[in-house]
Amino acid sequence: MIIKDRKLVLEYATRKISETDFISKYPHKLDNNYMVNCFSKVLESKDTKDLEYLFMMLNFIEEKSLCPILCELLVECWHSKHDNIATILQFDVDYPECVDFVVEAIHLECKLWYPSYRESFIKKCTYILAYLETEKALEKLKELSNSSDDLIKKYALDQINEIEN
């Protein structure tokens, strides 16, 4: 277990205690180094519970510093945080280095996903690529638009049409 005081994290996440109380009671200094280290350990251990708790603590980190780890998590099937990660990459950070990871994630078919989840996830991922507006991201969208997978093809074409209009 990487997160030492899960009960305290849960109290904070459910707003039973204030951020100030949480910071004063948490057994470690909540800074970028600590949080990146925790995420790295979770990536190694594949501890889904700790990953859940870390996502409850995201406001204690500059998300851009987490991007390399989030990209690695994006292509792993042992957890269910893909949508959360895609949302961060979609709205909260501008991280062009994520392109290859996003493309790989588009092709994932994780057993933990419920049937309608995949479509929503593919849509988010193609949006990430379009939003980045880099040459590489646009090239990948064009490649995806030729996919034999109808969902991937549809959402890649939607984003290409959006860009062109």
Image (tube, rainbow, N blue to C red):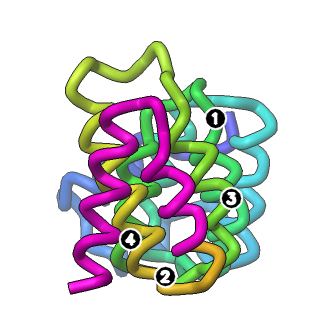
Q: Residue at x 43, y 52 (%)?
A: 145
Between marks 2 and 3, how big is the CA–CA gap? 12 Å
- Segment colored magenta: 138-165
Between marks 1 and 2, how big is the CA–CA gap? 22 Å
Badge 4 vs badge 3, beta-carbon distance below 8 Å: no
Q: The residue tagged with tag 1: helix, strand or loop? A: loop
Q: Position of residue 101 (x, y in %)?
A: 65, 54
Badge 4 vs badge 1, beta-carbon distance below 8 Å: no
Amino acid type indicated by mark 1: Glu
According to the image, label 1 marks what residue? 76
According to the image, label 3 marks what residue? 100
Q: Earlier in the sequence, mark 4 or mark 3?
A: 4
Horizontal side, residue 114 vs residue 85: left or right: left
Q: The residue tagged with tag 2: helix, strand or loop? A: helix
Amino acid type indicated by mark 3: Asp
Badge 1 vs badge 3, beta-carbon distance below 8 Å: no
Between 139 and 128, the one lying in front of the other is 139
